[in-house]
Image (tube, rainbow, N blue to C red):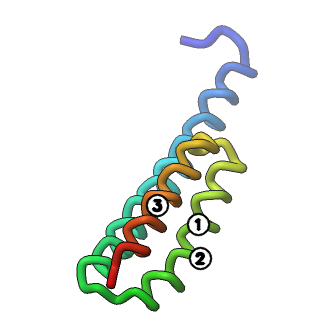
Amino acid sequence: MPLHTAAYKAIRSDAKKRKRNEAIKSELKTIVKKIDGLIAQAKKDEARNYLKLVSAKFMRAASKNIIHKKNASRKISRLAKKINKIK
């Protein structure tokens, strides 16, 4: 148990931050699945347009230190490669 009131506050704020971070990570996973579905259906134009939204979400999460910057860049790059392979 915490001994100071500041420690209690830290526990409360950490719980809020954890909840927000989990929600954002879950949203990122969902949009990656959606763009993978577009790639599987060979809808190149739709996937390219959606990639702009996906990359913005990833970079925003990276800027808020929810995920690492290089992790975001790697995922965006791999999605772009998949889209470019569509004929």
| Residue situated in front as seen by the camera: 68 or 45 | 45
| Residue situated in front as seen by the camera: 75 or 8 | 75
Q: CA distance from mark 3 to mark 1?
A: 10 Å
**Residue 44 shown left or right of residue 68 in the figure:** left
> Mark 3 sits on what residue?
28
* Furthest-right residue in this view: 6
**For the point 39% across and 59% down, which residue is it?**
29
Q: Amino acid at mark 1?
A: Ser
Residue 16's place in the image compared with 59, above or below, is above
Residues at marks 1 and 2 touching, judged by CB atoms closer than 8 Å? yes
Q: Which mark is residue 84?
A: none
Residues at marks 3 and 2 touching, judged by CB atoms closer than 8 Å? no
**For the point 53% across and 11% down, which residue is it?**
1
**Residue 8 shown left or right of residue 54 in the figure:** right
* Disc 3, SS: helix
> Mark 2 sits on what residue?
52
Q: CA distance from mark 3 to mark 2?
A: 13 Å
Q: CA distance from mark 1 to mark 2?
A: 5 Å
Q: Amino acid at mark 2?
A: Lys
Residue 32 image-quadrant placement = bottom left
Front label number (3 vs 1): 1
> Mark 1 sits on what residue?
55
**For the point 73% across and 20% down, which residue is it?**
5
**For the point 64% across and 49% down, which residue is it?**
62
Q: Amino acid at mark 3?
A: Leu
Residue 17 in view, yes or no: no
Residue 4 in view, yes or no: yes
**Residue 38 shown left or right of residue 45 in the figure:** left
* Furthest-left residue in this view: 40
